[in-house]
Amino acid sequence: MYLQHFGLAQYPFSLTPNTHFFLKLPSHVEVFDRLIETLENQGGFVKITGEVGTGKTMLCRKVLNALENYKHRYVTAYVPHPILSEEGIMHALAEELSVAYKANTSYYDLLKRITEQLVALNLENKCVVLFIDEAQAMPEESLEAIRLLSGASGSQKKLLQVVLFGQPELDIHIEHPSLHKLNSQIRFSYKLPALDRDGVEAYVQHRLTKAGFSGSVMFSRAALDQLYKSSRGIPRLINILAHKSLMAAYGKGQQLVDHNHVSLAVADTESISQDSQTLIRRILKN
């Protein structure tokens, strides 16, 4: 569409998480390093929360990719959509861990096979890490089943480490009395913040550079000010508005994105016209 016009090799503001565009902002570097450190120390449960669009899934994939370089030590499992029953989450885990079972296998036998696999990996000195995205949507009984499984060996060393990524509602979710034991086992918790004004500028420039831009400026200072104000520093909203701003500038045959182009993008984006963060989250989830 506008790639050739702006001298880009690929679209810089895609909504699909791509670790190629991962920006080492201080907040993301801190949580990445702390998360890796916690996993190294067999930390049990980890909780990462943030508003919709603050980069949780991107961070999750970055950590997964990092652990791929240490296959001799780590075995990873990833559940992106955890709205599953207790049995459903175990089927997902069994599939991720390559546990063989038949369609008519009972839940008891499934748990037994998963536990045997975890014990076997543990004896090989391998750490099994389960990453659960959108964990705020996971039923309480499913979370509790994962907790019980993590310490099924009866030893102090966890058979399964679990990293929960979720929206702020996850904090409320795990405070339910039925999840008291799980809550007490969280060894590291972090809330991803939105970007400040300098962070927005660094984010935009980083993604443009990664997409092949070799010039000095594509977004004017006024455009970046408007982008920060309208997006509230939320990366997903920045991506939506920046992409539409580029389209607006391209449509007018202009090389520099100015605040007028961002204003057009804002007017074309329903969620920005609302002042409610809750409504923004609902719109972006659809």
Image (spheres, rainbow, N blue to C red):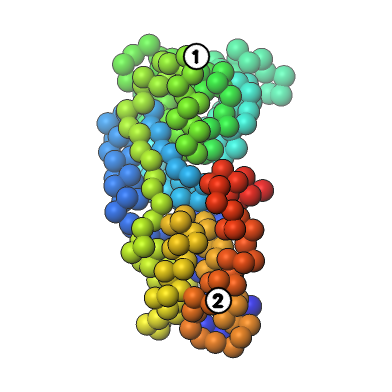
Horizontally, is 165 left or right of 106 in the view?
A: left
CA gap, disc 2 to disc 1?
A: 50 Å
Residue 21's place in the image compared with 192, above or below, is below
- Circle 1 sits in a helix, a strand or a loop, which is it? helix
Residue identified by numbered label 2: 261
| Extreme-bottom residue of the structure | 253
Task: Estimate the x, y position of residue 232 in percent, counting from the top left.
Answer: 46, 56
Q: Which numbered disc flags the more N-terminal residue, 2 or 1?
A: 1
Q: Is residue 254 left or right of residue 62?
A: right
Residue 214 vertical placement versus 51 (above, below): below
Up the image or down, 214 lies above or below 140; here it is below
Comparing 189 with 221, the one in front is: 221
Secondary structure category for the residue under label 2: helix
Instruction: Please report the residue visible at 52 percent of the width from the left and 83 percent of the height from the top.
Output: 6
Q: Residue at x 44, y 63 (%)?
A: 228
Which residue is located at x 43 percent, y 57 percent?
Answer: 233
Across and down, in percent, residue 89 comes to 59, 27
38 or 66, which lies in front? Answer: 38
| Residue 44 image-quadrant placement | top left
Which quadrant holds residue 240?
A: bottom right
Q: Which residue is mark 1?
A: 178
Say which amino acid is labelled 2: His
Of 286 and 22, nearer the camera is 286
Circle 1 crowding by C-alpha within 10 Å: few under 14, some 14–19, many from 20? few
Would residue 180 appear left or right of 138 to someone viewing this image?
left
Q: Is residue 223 above or below residue 275?
A: below
Q: Position of residue 2 (x, y in %)?
A: 59, 79
Q: Mark 2 and mark 1 in contact? Answer it, CB < 8 Å.
A: no
Amino acid under disc 1: Ser
Q: Residue at x 62, y 31 (%)?
A: 83
Residue, far right: 104
Q: Nearer the viewer, residue 17 or 250?
A: 250
